[in-house]
Image (cartoon, rainbow, N blue to C red):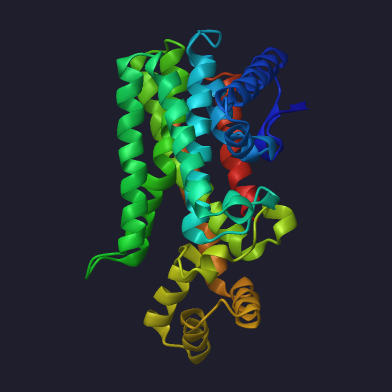
Amino acid sequence: MTVVGPFGLSVRDQALEADVQVGLAAVEEGLLEATKSEVPFITEAAQHLVRAGGKRFRPLLVMLAAQFGDPYAPGVVPSAVVVELTHLATLYHDDVMDEAAVRRGVASANTRWGNSVAVLTGDFLFARASQILADLGPEAVRVQALAFERLVTGQILETAGPQDGRDPVDHYLDVLAGKTGSLVAVSCRFGAMMSGADERLVDVISQYGERLGVAFQLADDVLDIASDSRESGKTPGTDLREGIPTLPVLRLRERTARLGLAEDRALCELLDSDLSDDGRHAEALRLLRAHPALEQARRDTVRYAEDARAALTPLPECDAKAALVELCDAVVHRAG
């Protein structure tokens, strides 16, 4: 048994392992090439997060999905570069919106160079992704454009909050399907599509990707509360400090409305206070880590991961399918 990709994913077939490793190495080269500029400062800023590393979760999914067709098809690696560049661009923008200080274990771009440079660097990465995408054909452009629209819509819905009468948890899950699920689904779609896989399988793998993407983000929500910076590579409780209601907080508020327990109300009041104060922030993290709402969020993560696994049922049995199934388990393990 060997190991490849994020979360210590085990790949049992040597040929599959070789294909994935070679593909990911080519993606890494493609990322460095795509982030070069004639202006040295732009190269430095654009490669800041590339060189910081990362799980390369989306390129891995491209490589695995491509196994259902021709994994050596010329569009596979460039499409993986496109989805990772798009993801990286959103991280530059997210860190500005969240005022995050750390990303992938290094100072965020906005901390190092300021908000303007971080936003413009994200825009630069979007532009480079679009250049690569143009060579992959009009269908690829359409797929990416629709996904990007969903991604931005999800971000706007998160900022606007749920409409009156809308269940906040349902609203939040819709936000995640747009913000995270859409690009993970495109990663799976591109891999299968570029490899020439049967159209029915392309749709199946795309559905899996969207559900896995939501589970992936829910696991991130749990990690944001439960882990320290050494585990997650970013500052714990960032969303908490900014007042962004992630799933553990939403489950807490749901429980408070249902049961009306004094200790739950007190924690909600703490969360509604000024968490820029380090003492309050630390206390809120401590209480949430011990609260049943965090365990409920873990159960929600498991449910989405199981839905992703179920979506794979129509795929033929093979090592690539086994690896996709194992990713569901890995996401759950990541959430503890």
When the figure is inspected, residue 171 is found, relative to residue 88, above or below; the finding is: below
Q: Quadrant of the N terminus?
A: top right
Residue closest to the eye, 39 or 129: 39
Q: Residue furthest front?
A: 39
**Rendered location of residue 318, percent (x, y):** 57, 18
Query: Compared with residue 37, is residue 73 higher up or lower down, i.e. above or below?
Result: above
The number of numbered discs placed on residues in the rendered structure image is 0
- Seen in the picture, residue 324 relative to 255 is either above or below; the reply is above
Give the x, y percent position of residue 204: 39, 27
Image point (64%, 24%), residue name: 28
Q: Is residue 27 visible?
A: yes
Q: Residue at x 65, y 49 (%)?
A: 333
| The furthest residue to the bottom | 262
Comparing 179 with 174, the one in front is: 179
Q: Name the quadrant containing residue 298.
A: bottom right
Q: Based on the displayed image, in which of its 4 quarters is residue 58 positioned? A: top right
Asked whether the viewer can see residue 311, the reply is no
Most distant residue in the left direction: 164
Residue 156 location (% of width, % of height): 32, 54
For the point 56% across and 26% down, the residue is: 37
Q: Out of 122 and 186, give the one closest to the viewer.
A: 122
Q: Position of residue 76 (x, y in %)?
A: 51, 16
Q: Quadrant of residue 52?
A: top right
Left or right of 231 on screen, residue 121: left
Q: Looking at the rendering, in which quadrant would you find the C terminus?
A: bottom right
Q: Residue furthest right?
A: 1
The reply, left or right, for residue 158 in relation to residue 292 is left
